[in-house]
Each structure stands twice: as structure tokens, then as C-alpha cells.
Image: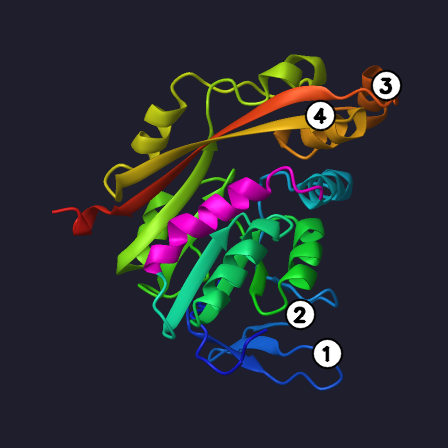
Amino acid sequence: MPSSRPMPLRCPVCRVPLQAVDNPGAPLSALVCGSGHSFDAAKQGYYNLLVGKGTVFEADSAPMVAARFNFLESGHYRPLAEAVAAAVAPLVPQRGEFTILDSGTGTGQYLRVLLDEVSRRGASCTAVALDISKFALRRASRLNPEAICLACDVWQPLPIADAAVDVVTVIFAPRNGAEFARVLRPGGRLVVVTPRAGHLAAVAERTGMLGIEEDKDARLAESLSGHFVAESARDLDIGMMLTPGEVADLAFMGPAGHHLDRAALVSSLGTGDEVTAVDARFRITVFRPATAAT
């Protein structure tokens, strides 16, 4: 976890700034606020800031996270990670300071590509990665040790200071427009990735994956209205040739994984060497704060 720059963190209990404090006998510092609330790092390197009753939402399970990690490691979605980094790149100052909030970071593989791009530009980066799944954060913190990985619920007040972030990235994750607007600096940007109609259509019905709503773009704009205005959008199509195992990982790593029987899914797909042509269809939308739109 970076310690050379002030962290843009706030205590989830009292909203007082959080600071890293040496924790004797522990490999990582604790996060402590001036009111005395303290949060130790898990041995895997992330901090659990889910307080009170935690979250009512179902976090991704260990098998779901393993499926996501394996699929992304295959490189099929690498063009998407690079496209997100390209959308953020114009915002990064040469040899300046830059702060990223990756909301719904998952296994951290998209953030890894983005951090490498920021590093290539010579900027000094503070990265905060959020997720509700401890299994995802275990992998994310290992992959991105320079990031501050936090378990928290995006629908609760985020443990981030006001106007402290240069860019928020949200890749297939929930979007709390009010909180994103609060933590972004006036010139900051929100980068959102959503699937488009026809996404994974060749395997969606076979695997029980959720369909893409026809009004998804309208619902996205409505969910962010009053806080953000769309500035630009780019469509990205990725053609893939997937083995049965990769199709199973693709299905199980998303929301459908909460109700799919993986063993039955794998059995239905077969174990041969045949491959299936699958098209992934994404939209990468860059939003600016509504207050900066005029």
C-alpha cells in the first residue's frame, strides 16, 4: 500500500480521515482515524471497511472469482482493458499526480493494465480499489500491491474524501452516481463499461447467462442523470474462439454464477477440443460531472 502521499480515505464509521499507522507484528499498516476506529489489513493485503450489518448484496463466491481470474488471464478481454486505459490516458498528467478509484475492481486485472499505462506516462498514482467480495480482493491485492484495496458497499457512502479522485472506473459493476460525483474532482471523469445488445449471444442461452436489456443505455443515463453528462462513447467488439472450459468460466464469472450449477454446466458443454465462436460487445462511455457540463 502506498504511504508516501496522503490517502484520500475517510472512516466508514465517522467520516474522519483515515491514516496508515504501523501495526507491530503485522505485515501491513492498519488504517486508523482520529476518533480511534481502526481497521487491520487481512493477511492477503486488503482492508474490510464493511461496518455495521455489512452489505445486503451477495458477494461473488470463490469459484466465481476463480472463473473470472482464469478467463481474464486467457487474454480474451485484454483489448477491453487496453481500451479503458486508452480512455483514461488523456486525463493523466505527464509526471504529475493522479488518483484512480476502481469501483467493483473484481480480480484487479483491468486495473493492472490501467496502472501500467499511468506508470508509462511517468505519473505518480494513488489507486483505490473497491469490491464487496473478499475472494476477489485477495486476488486484486496480490496483483496490484500498490493499490489500496477495500471491501465496501458502493451503495453506502464511499470511504473516500470529497473531490479527491481524478477518474472513477466502473467495469460491469453497480454505479452510485451521487457518490461518484462527490468524490470526483471538478475536472474528473467517470468511465463506465457496459455490454451491448448481442453480447455473448452465441452462448448466453446455452449457459443460462442473463440477457442484455434493450434499454440499457437509457437506464445507464437515467441512473447518472443530475450528476453526470455523457461526453463520449466508444463501441468495442471482440471476436473470440472459446473452448468448453472457457465458455464455462465466462458464464460462471458473472451474475449468473450465483445460481448456476457449475458441474452441470461443464457437463452440458462437453470436454472436447471443439471451439465456439463468440462475440463480446461493449460500450465504453466517458462521463463528465454535470456541474462541469456548461
- Above or below, 206 against 263 in this view is above
What is the three-letter code of the residue carrying label 3? Gly
- Queried whether the magenta region covers residue 82, the answer comes back as yes
- Above or below, 161 against 266 in this view is below
Number of the front mark, 3 or 1: 3
Number of the front mark, 3 or 4: 3
Q: Is residue 155 left or right of residue 64?
A: left
- State the colouring used for the structure image: rainbow
Instruction: Tell me what residue is drawn at x 78 percent, y 39 percent.
Output: 63
Quadrant hosting residue 58:
top right
Give percent across and percent down for residue 52.
57, 55
Q: Secondary structure at mark 4?
A: loop
Q: Could you say which disc has been placed on residue 41 in the image?
A: 2
Q: Secondary structure at mark 1?
A: loop
Instruction: Tell me what residue is drawn at x 36 percent, y 26 percent.
Output: 217
Give percent across and percent down for residue 214.
42, 16
Q: Could you say which disc has been placed on residue 259 in the image?
A: 4
Q: Which residues are magenta?
A: 74-91
Q: Specify whether residue 4 is in view.
A: yes
Cα separation, mark 3 vs mark 1, equals 44 Å
Q: Could you say which disc has been placed on residue 270 in the image?
A: 3
Q: According to the image, label 1 marks what residue?
A: 27
